[in-house]
Image (spheres, grey):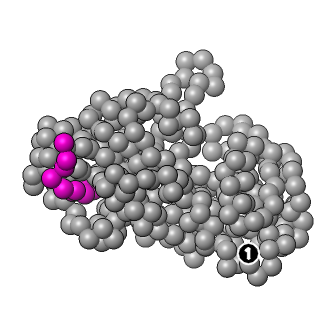
């Protein structure tokens, strides 16, 4: 059945991004109230009809991840019970993705659990950006559009690289990120280097070796997530102080910037940290080293194509 039209709503996670998307699509942001009961439970009230409409809900599940995930589930339940035609969740940052498989006994697979919860809540489609692990796409039994932010980040660096491309190299922060780094290096037509590291515990790492030539080079370390920034700033400091690199840049799709992340970036050898606005960056986390490029136009175009039954593959 054809939809009566499109409506866009936003949770509390990244309303600024939702407003940007609405501005691009020339749509009004849907009227919805989010409140809490005295015990902290989330209360949702949708103040306009959604019956028969294709609804797009903008909500990355960033900090506080549990709150924002529950918002998604409750809002989608409300939309389903209000007879929305199709419920599309635009989740640029997909929380709980780092537990995507069992690496030891008695561990959960939270990436699969979240997929199941979204489907149970009535979601018909998910649009996301740079999942922590590509295989998470297989956890969904509904359509999932997996967009990439690499070309947006590469666009920032192209003017710098073109001045003297032989002086630049793309660096993967670990062996698991080689595919991401190689795609990024192809966008910029640069060689790559790889950092070998060990992780004694979560959010900590020790650099063991570097594969590739970084001596006298400007380095771009690319990752999907910057959380506490401990791992990536350690890598940047190692490149600058022990491996002979010149300027070191770091870039990632999702800037969680938890805990001491901003201070670590400010105090490190990093010249610039380039991220997208998939996660809202509050004023308290802004600093002169952090540059934000908007993923809003790409998400808006994906929404437009999905609503009009056009190909989305060009945006991958």
Say which residue appears at 67% left-offset and 74% top-offset.
Answer: 158
Question: Which residue is at the front of the view, 30 or 243?
Answer: 30
Tell me if I can see residue 41 in this picture.
no
Q: Residue furthest top?
A: 105
Q: Please indicate whether residue 123 sits to the left or right of residue 149 in the image.
A: left
Position of 177 relative to 99 (above/below): below
Residue situated furthest bottom in the rendering: 163
Q: Residues within 10 Å of mark 1 (few under 14, many from 20)?
A: some
- Could one spot residue 143 in this view of the protein? yes
Mark 1 residue element: helix
User: Which residue corresponds to the image point at 64% horizontal and 53% vertical from the top-left?
Assistant: 223
Towards the viewer: 287 or 92? 92
| 143 within the magenta span | no
Q: Position of residue 184 (x, y in %)?
A: 68, 59
**Where is 31 relative to 283, above or below?**
above
Task: Name the residue: 15% across, 53% down.
Answer: 4
Which segment is the magenta one? 1-10
Say whether residue 15 is left or right of residue 313. Answer: left
Question: Left or right: where does residue 155 sit relative to residue 126?
Answer: right
Q: Position of residue 118 (x, y in %)?
A: 34, 35
Q: Quadrant of residue 16?
A: bottom left
**Could you tell me which residue is drawn at 40 percent across and 30 percent down?**
141
Which of the 4 image quadrants contains residue 77?
top left
Residue nearer the viewer, 292 or 2: 2
Q: Nearer the viewer, residue 296 or 250?
A: 296
Label total for image: 1
The residue pinned by badge 1 equals 161
């Amino acid at each position: 059945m054809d939809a009566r039209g499109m409506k866009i709503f936003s949770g509390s996670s990244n309303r600024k991004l939702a407003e940007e998307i609405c501005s691009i699509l020339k749509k009004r942001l849907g009227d919805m109230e989010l409140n809490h009961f005295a015990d902290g439970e989330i209360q949702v009230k949708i103040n306009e009809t959604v019956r028969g409409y294709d609804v797009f809900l903008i909500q990355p599940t960033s900090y506080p991840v549990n709150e924002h995930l529950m918002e998604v589930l409750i809002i989608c339940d409300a939309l389903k019970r209000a007879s929305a035609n199709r419920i599309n969740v635009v989740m640029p940052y997909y929380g709980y993705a780092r537990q995507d498989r069992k690496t030891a006994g008695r561990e959960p697979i939270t990436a699969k659990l979240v997929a199941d919860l979204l489907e149970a809540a009535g979601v018909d489609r998910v649009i996301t950006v740079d999942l922590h692990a590509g295989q998470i796409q297989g956890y969904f039994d509904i359509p999932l559009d997996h967009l990439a932010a690499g070309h947006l980040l590469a666009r920032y660096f192209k003017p710098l690289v073109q001045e003297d491309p032989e002086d630049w190299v793309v660096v993967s922060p670990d062996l698991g990120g080689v595919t991401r780094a190689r795609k990024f290096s192809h966008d910029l037509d640069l060689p790559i280097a790889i950092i070998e590291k060990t992780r004694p515990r979560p959010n900590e790492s020790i650099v063991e070796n570097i594969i590739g030539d970084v001596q006298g080079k400007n380095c771009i370390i690319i990752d999907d997530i910057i959380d506490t920034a401990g791992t990536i700033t350690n890598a940047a400091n190692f490149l600058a102080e022990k491996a002979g690199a010149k300027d070191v840049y770091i870039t990632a799709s999702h800037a969680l910037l938890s805990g001491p992340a901003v201070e670590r970036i400010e105090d490190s050898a990093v010249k610039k940290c380039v991220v997208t606005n998939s996660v809202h960056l509050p004023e308290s986390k802004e600093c002169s080293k952090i540059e934000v490029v908007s993923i809003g136009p790409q998400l808006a175009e994906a929404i437009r194509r999905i609503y009009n039954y056009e190909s989305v593959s060009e945006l991958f």
